[in-house]
Image (spheres, rainbow, N blue to C red):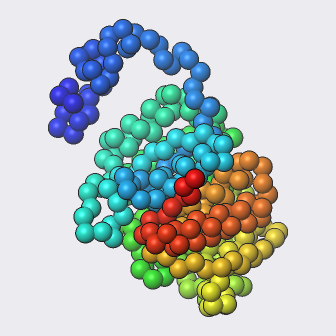
Amino acid sequence: MSDGGPDGRVPAGDRSSARKNSPELGSPDRSSIDRDSFNPLPVDVVSIQSQVVYGCVGNTVAVPTMQALGLNVISLPTVLLSNVPHYDTLHGGPVSTAWFEGFLADVERRRVLESARAILLGYLGPPEQTAVLVAWLERVLASHPQIQLLLDPVIGDHDVGIYVHAELPGLLRERLVPMSHGLTPNSFELEQLVGKRLTTLDETIAAARQLLSSTTEWIVVTSAAPAETSAGETSVLIVTADDTRVITHRLVETVAKGAGDLFTASLAGRLLLGDSLYEAAQFACDKTEAVMTHTTELGCAELVLNQRR
């Protein structure tokens, strides 16, 4: 837009003139409507994570998954990419910290947090952007105690190692885990959070319990203790302060990314609908296995959420 600076942002003092002069922002008659006097959207979940134009990872899988459960979701991207970085072309990158900070501020100004029941965090951007998010969350969670922070601490996996900025595991461990209501790490990510290798189910349970607190009530570990899981299967470990349960389901081999994002969104959605943690985890396992099976049958490299009628 011609009214903005080099990065496309409109300076705070120029917003009213931008509205009047920019057809994209509406005519003067439309801008005279006090939209904030209307009731805000009845939002259930604010989903903050990566987003792609093509494919099904991050918000691009989380939002439709939770909407299919009847939940109202708004998405806030940390990075915006044309596709996952496994193709011969890739465009986009992290959302600028200034834009990201503005997104958070406007979500608050639009009174979204009055009805929100959960904030879902997935793949995060660079450290400076994450620092803005941490400060916002600390204030928002204190002033809106009805909101649960659900964290998928995206760091990496055993087959590829760490694929986020080197400072992010520390930020997750020290700042975001302590304020989270629930966590959904894979086994590699749990290792990064506790700082040690976890080869057995007992070690994994003990490590998960290290992270529990008066705030963090549960941890669901995907791909838990793979060395102790039978070939062709994968285990999901559910840990609370007074209970431990394991769900084993079929391992579906696929090149498609986003299975963890799908699992967490399914789990979060069912929890908000009133399921117990175990029921929600079982639903998430079944949903993820079904989508991955369907994707494999179609020979696709991206998750296929819906079957054509």
> Dividing the image into 4 quarters, which one contains the N terminus?
top left
- In the rendered image, the vertical position of residue 279 relative to residue 12, given as above or below: below
> Measured along the vertical axis of the image, is residue 181 above or below residue 223?
above
* Residue at 71% in and 48% down: 272
Q: Quadrant of residue 261?
A: bottom right
Instruction: Locate residue 195, reporting x and y percent.
Output: 53, 78
Residue 194 in view: no
Q: Position of residue 125 (x, y in %)?
A: 38, 56
Instruction: Decide which of 142, 255 is in the foreground and name it.
Output: 255
**Left or right: 90, with 114 as reference point:** left
Q: State the residue in front, 68 or 122.
A: 68
Q: In terms of image quadrants, where is residue 260?
A: bottom right
Task: Give residue 54's quadrant in the image.
Answer: bottom left
Q: Is residue 249 left or right of residue 301?
A: right
**Residue located farthest toward the front when viewing the structure as drawn:** 309
Depth order, front residue of 33/182:
33
Residue toward you, 285 or 243: 285
Q: Is residue 249 left or right of residue 50?
A: right
Residue pictured at 36% horizontal, 52% vertical: 53
Residue 21 x %, y %:
23, 17
